[in-house]
Image (spheres, grey):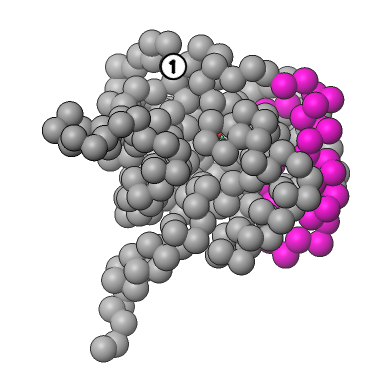
Amino acid sequence: MGIVNLTPDSFSNGGRYADIERAIAHAHRLLGDGADILDLGAESTRPGAAPVSLEDELGRLMPVLAGLRDFPMPISIDTYKPEVMEEAIRVGAAMINDINALRAPRAIDIVADSDTGVCVMHMQGTPQTMQQDPRYGDVVAEVKQFLADRVAALEDAGIGRERIVLDPGFGFGKTKAHNLALLRGLGELGALGLPVLAGLSRKSVLAKLTQCEDRKSAPQPEYEDRVPASIAAALLAVFKGARIVRVHDVKATCDALAVYSAVMAEPPLAV
Ligand code: HH2
């Protein structure tokens, strides 16, 4: 899943694709680079990000969606606002990617009345406060229980399991230790029997991991410096059972996954 952030303030590439032409060109580039799904988001959800009004979010998103009308790849819309879901579904969005797991009033009904897919993500708190002091007893068990409860609510509302993807929400109300535990325990979430999406690309947990004290040349990494760590994280997520990885750097990730798949293919490729 290739990311196109239509925001002036996204944490790693804010402002770069905020104008319509550049966003559309970037979507085509990600297609050429090997993405299978495009994820368009018009509101940054990085820790502390300011909420965006409905008008602004629609104003950023809808012209780009119109420009991608015949795009030969499913388009996912990263939003937690029911009104944005409604508009995006009306113009053919293939998936709603909701960091709030369809908990806003009406969100679940809007998706249930359509045939679109949905990614439900775990988040503790809200983007404004989530990184202040996240706490869990057993992070993997609690995230798993939350996702299981959301799946039950979605199914009750008439959303079939074949439409649902699960996401532990790396970085959304989680410390470094929580994120690592979730990556290690991703297979536990897979046990719920639905595809798992992992979004670790360029996230600050990777900068924390690469800033070892014994490395002399390790200043706070620039976001682009997080690409190698992002690829390692994507491969590990796939190794742990993720079916979708949400990434900024599609070409580099696809190259790494091509090597991974060739080695891991079963039965082994003939030599
Ligand atoms: N992460 C971000 C946004 N949306 N959706 C899902 N399902 N999973 C994620 O991990 C996830 C997500 C944050 O990353 P990004 O879009 O690059 O930044 P920003 O929110 O600042 O636009």
What's the residue at 61%, 58% (across, down)?
30
Answer with left or right where residue 231 lies relative to residue 271: right
Q: Quadrant of residue 224?
A: top left
Residue 136 forms part of the magenta stretch: no
Q: For residue 1, say whether it is visible.
A: yes
What's the residue at 79%, 55% (across, down)?
68
Residue 60: % across, % down: 79, 35
Residue 225: % across, % down: 39, 43
Q: Nearer the viewer, residue 213 or 54?
A: 213
Q: Which residue is mark 1?
A: 131
Q: Is residue 75 above or below residue 58?
A: below
Name the residue furthest bottom. Answer: 271
What's the residue at 50%, 52% (across, down)?
249
Q: For residue 125, say whether it is visible.
A: no
Q: Which residues are magenta?
A: 52-81
Q: Is residue 63 above or below residue 150?
A: below
Answer with left or right where residue 201 lies relative to residue 239: right
- Number of residues whose C-alpha sits closer than 10 Å to that of mark 1, classed few (under 14), some (14–19) or many (20 or more): some
Q: Quadrant of residue 78?
A: top right
Element assignment for label 1: loop
